[in-house]
Amino acid sequence: MSKAKVALIGCNFVGMSLGLAIKQALEHVEVIGHDKDREAVRQAESVRAIDRSDWNLPRTCEGAAAIFICAEHDELETTLRAIADDLTPSTLVVAVGVRSVAALEMAQKLLAKDVPFFSTALVYHPDRVSDGSALPAPESIRDAIWAIAPSAGASTAMVDALFALASQLGARPMFIDPLERDGMALAVEVMPAVLSRILMLAVSDDAGWRERMWMAGASFGQAVHSVRRAAALADALCAQPKVAVHWLNQVMRQCIALRDAIAQGDSRAITAIFSQAEARHQEWLSNWRKGRTEDHIPIERDHGGLLKLLLGERLAGRLSGNKTR
């Protein structure tokens, strides 16, 4: 049986975790990686997240049954322009980790109407991935929420194919409204980086910083570390100014409550604030560990050849409810 080709654009943590999961879960698939950063490609090859790499972007995607774009948001337009002419209605095109609304608008402008494009996000299980800078493992995607927003050109069959593929990789696929996804992503993905930069400025602006900076060591470095570039943070905030202001107001509201309790010497109020935060943290972890309990979305039997190509006929039949295969 010939191998189905999967193109992986972007050999970052997300890209490598996808490549590892695909190679572990699917037998007859060849994963071809592409990244303008040669060190990222070498790292992906070293952990065997890809079978081989290709520096030429269009050639990487040529003839691929599925294309996963895990590059930065500002690289999405360049990628889509480079591969648009070679895409067909049977090519699964999946952007992972970009702003959903902007990505869907970009795809609508650059791709043919019948090309099935999906703007998605992988939300990793807190117990599987503790540090986004670490190398992924094949199980990194297990129990992750795979939030999916399909384009208008994505047929029911292709939506089914992506849901089936995500499930086979161990993730939990779910539909999500693009606007809601972007708003929440700003709070839980962008704001932590924003606040770490603000903390760096707050501490270093103090008059005593120059003489006392040597008291700031590893723990402070961990608190203010962020891999997000300044320009990327600015773009994310300016893309949703009302939402960004809302979350900053929420943070300031909590800071003001804590400041007032400290100024009043009210240790009970201070303890209550931190106890409430810890309780909500534990509740969040507990809910993740219980998992979502949504009903299974049935896969159509008439899903065409993509599932068979990627998953194999027996598995595709089982996922579609055809027990005789």
Image (spheres, rainbow, N blue to C red):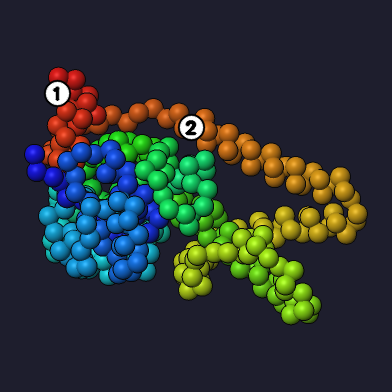
Rounded to the nearest angstrom, the CA distance separating label 1 from label 2 is 30 Å
Q: What is the quadrant of residue 201 in the picture?
A: bottom right
Q: Which mark is residue 262?
A: none
> Quick check: 283 above or below 194?
above
Disc 2 element: loop
Residue 93 located left or right of residue 1: right
Disc 1 element: loop
Mark 2 and mark 1 in contact (Cβ < 8 Å)?
no
Counting the numbered discs, the total is 2
The residue at the point 51 percent across, 52 percent down is: 131
Q: What is the quadrant of residue 46 in the picture?
A: bottom left
What residue sits right under mark 2 in the picture?
A: 291
Where residue 239 appears, x then y in whole percent?
A: 46, 66
Quadrant containing the N terminus is: top left
What residue sits right under mark 1 in the picture?
A: 325
- What is the three-letter code of the residue carrying label 2? Gly
Where residue 30 appears, x then y in whole percent?
A: 19, 49
Where residue 11 appears, x then y in whole percent?
A: 33, 59
The residue at the point 15 percent across, 46 percent down is: 4
